[in-house]
Image: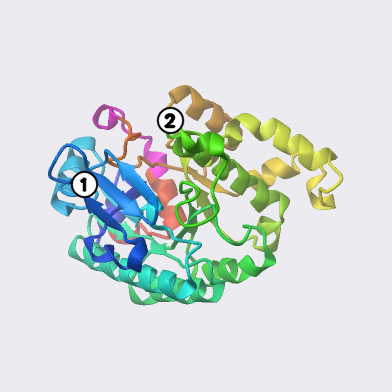
Amino acid sequence: MGSGAQRAGVIDVHAHVVLAETFGAAGDLGPEMGGQDGNSPWFRVGDYRLDGVRYQGSPFMDPALRLRRMAEAGIDFQVLSPNPLTFLHFIEPELAIRFCCTHNDALARLVAAHPGRFAGFAALPIQDIGAAVEELHRGVSELGLLGGYIGTDMPHRLDDPAMDRLYEACVALNVPLFLHPSPAGIDGPKGDPNLGDFDLDVVIGFAAQETLAVARLIYGGVLDRHPALDICLSHGGGSTGYLIGRMAMAARKRPWSPAGLRADGAFEERLARLWFDNHLNSDASLALFTSVVGEERLVFGTNFAGWDAPEDLATHRPPPQLADNARRLLRISQETAR
């Protein structure tokens, strides 16, 4: 990784990448794209088609262009993550394993070509937890990736005891696990039909998935069973900042709540053990969220080159503490930079 991340003043942990090597790696599901040279670009995974987003010749696929845009935005280092449209958590395990291996191999090659500017997260075939553990080990130990990356919608609930194998592997490898939503129905069960218009599956659905993830991780005892586990959620945990009072009250009062969550402040204490990126698209929302969770476990994220990426990055640099937080989360030592 060189000294890039160790010296970086701005580290972006929310930066998706689209890798040409993965096209067709999921068989009939694709992914594939078209219209990239015209005015109607599209990207397809299974029956899901994303229109109007150009990947070819964009920072998503062109490392030189990404680096140029990073320089313009004042971003020193990015940790590249899988495209949420290609999590593929509901397809046949054998196909998911092949896709994730192809993705992670390609990502590792990209990182190796730019070690001072990029690192990467491993895509995991979470429908087969044993295979996900194996790929996490391979991704970290052989490919040099910095942790695992999964969606919030999968065949297993986040608090399912079967998931403990993955959490234990993260702790044993001393790496974090990142959670990011994907649009419901790409390769699995359809979401609420009300989310089918106006991009609500992304605008509202993502926030709902992230808030549910926070609830299940805390109510379901994941953080109690794995006190050394570091999990980071995208977009400030969805609606968590706004719903914290209601979520904490439920922990204190509802009959399903375990004894350990009933004490005043018990929910809030566990919430403070989660990590979040600060990509909330609103200074007021971020201020509210920070007042709830503090800054100790907040990291900088942009959804770089995405439709909702901040437009004022070059003039709105994040506090230096967020880069230090990212180094703690990602286990990046600053010793060699001193």
Q: Is residue 63 left or right of residue 327?
A: left
**Residue located 45% across and 52% down the image:** 186
Q: Quadrant of the C terminus?
A: bottom left
Image quarter for residue 231?
bottom right
Number of labels in the image equals: 2
Do residues under tags 2 and 1 come within 8 Å of each other at their CB atoms?
no
| Residue for badge 2 | 198
Q: Quadrant of the N terminus?
A: bottom left
Within the magenta stretch, is there residue 321? yes
Q: How is the image coloured?
A: rainbow
Q: Secondary structure at mark 2?
A: loop
User: Does residue 96 lie above or below 13 as drawn?
Assistant: below
Which amino acid type is marked by label 2?
Answer: Phe
Which amino acid type is marked by label 1?
Answer: Pro
Considering every residue shown, the one lying at the far top of the view is: 284
Q: Is residue 311 left or right of residue 157?
A: left
**Residue located 82% across and 52% down the image:** 258
Image quarter for residue 244?
top right
Q: Residues within 10 Å of mark 1 (few under 14, many from 20)?
A: many
Residue 70 lies, in percent from the top left, at: 22, 43
Regarding residue 10, the answer to whether it shows in the image is no
Residue 165 lies, in percent from the top left, at: 60, 72
User: Does residue 282 lie above or below 3 as drawn?
Assistant: above
- Nearest-to-viewer mark from 2 and 1: 2
Q: Which mark is residue 59?
A: 1
**Residue located 51% across and 66% down the image:** 126
Mark 2–mark 1 Cα distance, whole angstroms, equals: 25 Å
Specify the segment rendered in magenta: 311-322
